[in-house]
Image (cartoon, grey):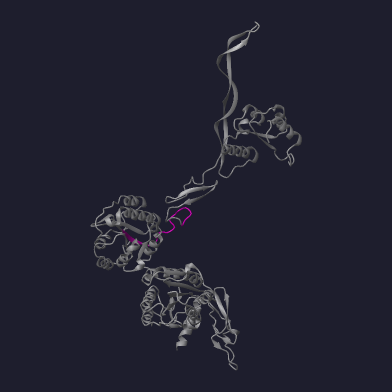
Amino acid sequence: RGGSTETGQALKYILHKGFPGGRNSSVPEVLIIISDGKSQGSTAMPAMQVKERHITVFAVGIKFPRWEELQALASEPPERHLLFAGDADDAANGLYSTLSDPVCTATAPGCKVESHPCERRTLETVKELAGSYVCWKGSKQPNAVQASLCPFIRWKRVLIKHPSRCFRTVCPDPCDSQPCQNGGTCVPEGLDRYHCLCLLGYGGDIHCAAKLSLECGADLLFLLDSSAGVTLEGFLRFKAFLKRFLQAMVGQDSPVSVGVAQYDDDVKVPIELGQHKDAVSLMKSIDALNFSGGRTLTGRALQYIAQHGFRSSPVFADVQDDLPRVVVLLTDSKSQDSVAEASKYVKDQNLFLIGIGSSFMRAELTTVTGNPQQTIVYSDPQDLFNRMPELQRKICSVGNPEGCQAQSLDLAFAVDASSGVGLENFLRLRHFVRSSCLHFIINRDVTQIALVIYGSKAHTVFALDTHTSNSAVLQAIDQVPFLGDSASAGSALLHVYSEVMTVQKGARPGVSKAVVLLTNGGGMQEAAAPAQQLRHNGILVFVVVIGHTERDTLLRVAGSPSYLVHISSYEDLQYYQGLIIERICEEARSPVNLCKPNPCMNQGVCILGPGSYRCECHGWEGPHCETRVLRGDSPRSPALPPRSHVQWSPRGLQHFSRALQHSKRQ
């Protein structure tokens, strides 16, 4: 507002008017005066009267206040009620601390008020003698002046310091406990919250803990390419990847024995299998690995490792060394010797190979491992570190059944056999289906597989309940003919819905169901509606498209990007097999609705119960409304209630379905 500083008048106003909107005398009254303490009027009497009214007065000095005046204004003891606002943070802390103690009697949880020595400062203007100068003075004699020395005074602004004690609120930093693991950075958020900035590979946990772990038992040997072709930069990248992977995956109680070898012209095993029992010493040994820079003799290195890499004794004497033996090859340089024979020799020694390299190494790594699913390729150096979970899964898949393991699944392949695909590419699609079936245990209790081919019309090659073994399915796939006419993916999906995924055709109630559509993208315009109908009935639709097709149309059919796999060429199809099977199996583990698709035949209504369902039939009878009721029939057996309200659990209904299918074949 400007004007003069009349602190005394302000206090008189408070004494006369009271606290505007104040409550009764049972509530403490606190007056906070914020001033430079340089009042033009007297403040002594009003200050005394305010204190006599039992009003607690805090005096907050700003900039360079006159502390003598503020001390007279503040309540006793002055060191608890006299504050300084020259520094905004200290002023807030001090005022909060002081108010919390005598008035509010509470501080933030875990915080405390502590005193510390400080000094108060006042900026005063004082006179200072600058010297004496010649000046002219009047003389008693008329019309005369007298020369003399006169003192010269100048005004000077001086900081006057007053030793004192200040108070502040001290709260523990939420990052003091160092909650972030594996090199993560703790970032505080207020007094009691924080978040961790994690290194790549540890972001799955809020504390950067190793979310993944190698809980599977294995003898694990890493073979690092140290040749000139991989360059020093590439070798250091592999070392960093190896350290981060082992820090994240291998704990103190991990059942994994780790060894590390490196190669160029020669092969060295600087870290023997099981040599280190703790992560710290293992990391130091990895740090000590040096780049050598010779020729890239990958074949020779593989053969040497097969002969000498797994000679170490088991970590514990009472544990038999019958764990799976895994070699992880990290290379980014094409071999200068043959890898095919060496790879075969490694496999003959019952070693399991996993290859890791950049994209241009894909073909050679596939030759080394013998299986595209056992190769890991990365697109750029940063992408390498994103592959750690994939490596963990591949290591722990050794000795385990592939595919969906013991999870029941009804799976149908719908394959485009139209002229747009062509005979050569159709044979690639047929081979893809054949090799995919190798990843499942095919029988009545685990996985049932059906195959549909389509051009302008769809044809069932074999139904879900046709074949009960892997060999029978593979033999049937080899006989699938090429059609060669126009394509209609919509008619194929409708055919799957009405002629394949039904109880009459072998579909099992209570079992996960999926359709994999393999197409070049032709004839997709009318496929969105039947795909949605399949999804509505609990049947997942995976769309695998090879070639260039409008993505919006594909998304309408797939329903979500999660169920769409777009591949640039038929030659690359084999590299996506692991991803597709993994996605199918993830979905197969999801809970299912026993009434989707409807297991009841002949317009029967499926009614869910706790862990079971029943069919309500009209004009039909039987557990699935499969028998027509004719007029004049003998009365129903008393064992069955009217309208066949029989409840079925998933296990019981699968046994019934098998019996029903057997009777139909008879």
Stretch of the chain drawn in magenta: 204-222
Q: Residue furthest front?
A: 143
Residue 2 placement, left or right of 187: right
Residue 151, quarter of the rendered image: top right
Residue 501 sits above or below residue 183 on the image: below
Q: Position of residue 197 (x, y in %)?
A: 46, 51
- Extreme bottom residue here? 632
Q: Position of residue 662 (x, y in %)?
A: 45, 85
In the rendered image, is residue 641 in sight? no
- Residue 437 position, x and y percent, is 39, 75
Locate the N terminus and report the quarter of the image it occupies: top right
Q: Is residue 210 within the magenta segment?
A: yes
> Relative to residue 114, is residue 535 depicted above or below?
below
- Predominant SS along the magenta part: loop
Above or below, 175 against 572 in this view is above
Please state if 237 lies on the left or on the right of 335 as rendered: right
**Magenta span includes 256:** no
Quadrant of the image containing the C terminus: bottom left
Coordinates of residue 613 in the picture (x, y in percent): 56, 77
Residue plotted at (48% across, 67% down): 561
- Out of 427 and 311, give the one closest to the viewer: 427
